[in-house]
Image (cartoon, helix red, strand yellow):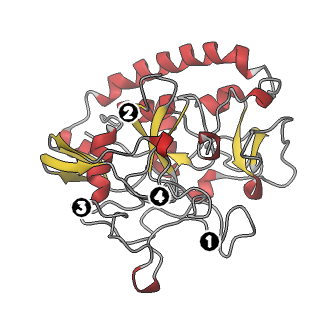
Amino acid sequence: MSDACCGPSRAQPDLLRIGSRAEPATEAPVQQVGQVQQVQQVQQVGHVRPPAEVLRGMVRVPAGPFRMGGEDPDAFPADREGPVREVDVAEFHIDAHQVTNRQFATFVKATGYVTEAERFGWSFVFERLVAPGARVLAGGVPGAPWWRAVDGASWRHPGGPGTDAGRLGQHPVVHVSWADASAYAAWAGKRLPTEAEWEKAARGGLDQARYPWGDELEPQGRPRCNIWQGEFPHAPAGRVGTMPVGSFAPNGLGLTDVAGNVWEWCADWFDETRAGRVMRGGSYLCHESYCNRYRVAARTSSPPDSSTGHLGFRCAV
């Protein structure tokens, strides 16, 4: 299965011809320089935050080893989930929930930061969430036709013009690239978690459980995460899209939404090719019939400049 299903790239062959204001293929280097400058500027603010302010809303993860990875029979071999190995992690803190639209708006207001999606002029939106009347750019994503490159889609307008993140204040921010997430983290006096930190925290103290709460997807028939209801991509049995953070019970360490809702950027490169950054946790588009990457050991990647309507982040210290 192509990673395009989880994190389509701006460099998809069919998308190199499109762009609302400039060709993404030629505009990208300029964007990257601009993002580096913005990250450097906001880092200065984060360095002076008092520790109590930085740690507010975070949970402590104690030092020690844990068994990382998995060997689930329905895993994707190319994702390199296994082998299971013991990894020793130093003590750290991590956000109890994904960064919200309200939090990201505070960051943007304080710094004037402009995300990569805003600079490019478009971003990927799931077909059922495209705003009525929004301009869908030509082209598509091979192997994932449900993605639409929408003119004007960004964290402010998650479905394109006509949609307003301000009405979704407690929903996770989306349409953020790896650089955007890193910039927010620097401003907050934090950083993105390493992949090992993310998985240790997501496991919530359980050893090799399939999900953050245990091995059963819906204990006593109760949903524990925001994933696709029904066989993907056919008509869903329930709602589609993000949910407010904390809509489900936390895991054993106090983290919510580490399965489903939105994917989360991690600090690490996915593999030695350094073509993509790690994404963990799955999203509201995941389902066992298509992409069961909401399992706690599951992993995938996306190019750092990618942005979609189901990709967000949380921070660590």
Of callouts 2 and 1, the N-terminal one: 1
Q: Residues within 10 Å of mark 2 (few under 14, many from 20)?
A: many
Residue 93 shown left or right of residue 164 in the figure: left
Crowdedness near tag 4: few (<14), some (14–19) or many (≥20) residues, C-alpha within 10 Å: many
Element under label 3? loop
Residue 281 coordinates in the image, percent (x, y)? 44, 53
- Label 4 with label 1: CB-CB less than 8 Å: no
Secondary structure, mark 1, is loop
The front one of 189 and 297 is 297
Comes first in the chain, label 4 or label 2: 2
**How far apart, in angstroms, are the residues tagged by discs 4 and 3?**
18 Å
- Mark 4 and 3 residues: CB-CB less than 8 Å, in contact? no
Mark 2 or 3, nearer chain start: 3
Q: Residue 21 — which label?
A: none
Q: Looking at the rendered structure, which numbered label has been put on residue 294?
A: 4
Q: Residue at x 41, y 25 (%)?
A: 42
Distance from Cα at disc 4 to Cα at disc 2: 19 Å
The amino acid at mark 1 is Gln
| Residue depicted at x 57% and y 28% | 305
Please determine whether, in this image, residue 211 is positioned above or below residue 105: below
Which of the numbered marks, if any, corresponds to residue 267?
A: 2
Marks 1 and 3 sit apart, C-alpha to C-alpha, by 27 Å
Identified at 47% across, 58% down, the residue is 294
Give whichever of discs 4 and 3 has the lower sequence position: 3
Which x, y percent locates residue 150? 77, 41
Cβ atoms under marks 2 and 1 closer than 8 Å: no
Q: Which quadrant would the N terminus be assigned to in this image?
A: top right
Q: Residue at x 83, y 24 (%)?
A: 17
Toward the viewer: 236 or 82?
82
Q: Amino acid at mark 3?
A: Leu
Residue where numbered disc 1 is placed: 229
